[in-house]
Image: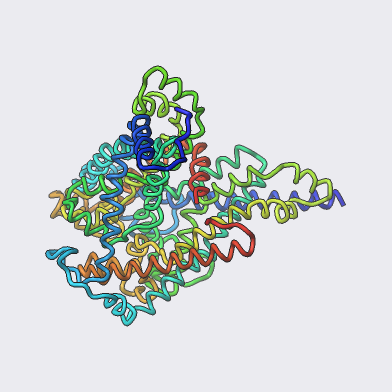
Amino acid sequence: MAKQRLPKTPVSVASIGKAIMKDYKRNKFKYLIVLPVIIYLLIFAYKPMYGVIIAFQHYKPFLGIDGSKWVGFDNFIAFFNDVYFFRLLKNTFSISLLSILFGFPAPIFLALLLNEIKNARFKRVVQTISYMPYFISIVVVCGLIKAFSQTDGVFNDIIFALGGERSNLLSVKENFYPIYILSGIWQSIGWDSIIYLAALAGIDQEQYEAARVDGAGRLKQMLYITLPGLLPTITVLFILRMGGVLNVGYEKILLLYQPLTYEVADVISTYVFRKGIVEANYSFSTAVGLFNSVVNIFFLMVTNKLSKKLNHTSLF
Amino acid sequence: MKQKQSKGDRIFTILNTLFMLVLVIITAYPMYHVLCASFSNNTELVANPGLAFWPKGFTTGAYRLAFQHPLILSGFKNSILILIFALPLNMLLTLFAAYFMASKNLMFKKVIVFVMMFTMFFGGGLIPMYLNQRSLGLYNNLAALIIPGALSMFNAIICKTAIENLPDSLSESAYIDGANDIVVLFRIIAPLIMPTIAVVLLYYAVGHWNNWFHASIFIEDNKLLPIQNILRSLLIMNQDALGGGELSGNGDRFDSYTETIKYAAIIITTVPILCIYPFLQRFFVKGITIGAVKG
């Protein structure tokens, strides 16, 4: 690759033109290579971003974006006054915060314990098996949850053996969150632990030696060396996770919920799906989706700021 | 003092090992259950669908019928067609994006990379995406499931980092020999980052293979549905109609395998992936770490 720097001063139209020509001559194949990528992104990423403006319209497909009527914030106001607004907000926050509360620490916990396994082969086998659920499709996972939750299914056999009552678990609304969150942990705990294991591999081994000399047991080493060593990774992932606080994925909920559990299971994204795709209420559902994104960005900013103040780690 | 600690450590080791064994059982049991159920006798399975440690009765009939089931077959065919067309497109765009991001001394690199990265954090959301795709005619055809998901910037960043870790001298000597960037990318760089490409291909393949949502909103014709949507009909919506008379034309035979055929279908769609990923496992760490650090 050519080494010379582009001339920075003096800046004149002629020199800029010259620099562009030179850049083009040297790098034309690189720009040619990136061209399909840019075209792709314009069509499938930027065009839908522009399409968000229908949130401020009364969009009719046959009129298009140019022909549809502008209505300002009407769609947003309609959503805030929607009978389901508070229920959706409550459900979305509940599912998300519970997932963070239980799901976020789980892989850290697993990584810490895996790190203490000294037999390399056993460790590898456990890891391989723990990744497996991540590769099982969400349809199959939900299909199994459904089959296992039947009155005479696997879950009920276990509950019965432990002295509980049999019931159709999925149609009881109190069960929805535990099922949703536990199955989520089941599916991703192994996969999510990879990043923490990688961070653990980077911790200076001499610290452990020193701690052993000072008489610290393995539990203490874990608390005072390993956990602090993981903190930067934990912080970054936590900020990212908080940035998606309202992103409760619709796929799993669409597959699991039923009229009996709508009251606790219906979240913003499933509402967008029903209003938009099923009822073709395009402008309204786009507004709901945009509201969702704005709240997410807000939480990302707040968490980022807090973390910058508290432990000097931040994304931006 | 020293003795006491090593005793505590020993207890910890035992508990930890036990915990791992429990984890392994909880993780693996569901698939084992599916395997047992798929070989079970349908009547016995319907009568007692709970905990099982071996097949209830033994028959391979569910598999034989699954491979004759018209919608399972067409689902398989569609999913494989999607992979055949999507994966080369995925890899091409991903390598293009990665190669550009890894290049140096480009005047417009910053702007263009920003244009690319921005899409990772902001999107139009479900409805604008849906409307955009319909307006492009990507509706009720397999292209609707191939073209829109052609590039994941996350995967491009994984490849970019792999390219950056190669020594510059490789491409430099190729330039001296008169090669252009396209030749350098495909002849020199791509072969050297094969492990990364394999992992990224796995991510794309799993993504396509396990996707059901897009087909559920973009495909109307049952014959065009990919395998996950067929599974969804069988498992979630409990459509016995899929196996019953109307669609297959030989309902009697399917009726005696209503439950077991579901489990056979799960096995034949899921096992291929479960057999591939362990071979690429050692490359996962790199990819994931890079992906998360990018911020």
Q: Is residue B82 above or below residue A1?
A: below
- Residue at position x 45%, y 35% from top? B105
Q: Position of residue B107 (x, y in %)?
A: 40, 39
Residue A46 visible at all = yes
Nearer to us in this view, B107 or A46: B107
- Residue at position x 25%, y 48% from top? B145
Q: Is residue A173 above or below residue B276?
A: below
Q: Position of residue B286 (x, y in %)?
A: 52, 40
Nearer to us in this view, B76 or A290: A290
Q: Is residue A203 left or right of residue B116?
A: right
Q: Is residue A42 left or right of residue A10?
A: left
- Residue at position x 60%, y 37% from top? A121
Q: Position of residue B73 (x, y in %)?
A: 22, 43
Q: Is residue B202 above or below residue B241?
A: above
Q: Is residue B99 above or below residue B228?
A: above
Q: Is residue B93 left or right of residue B28?
A: left
Nearer to us in this view, A74 or B30: A74
Residue A160 visible at all = no
Q: Is residue A55 left or right of residue B11?
A: left
Q: Position of residue A292 (x, y in %)?
A: 38, 68
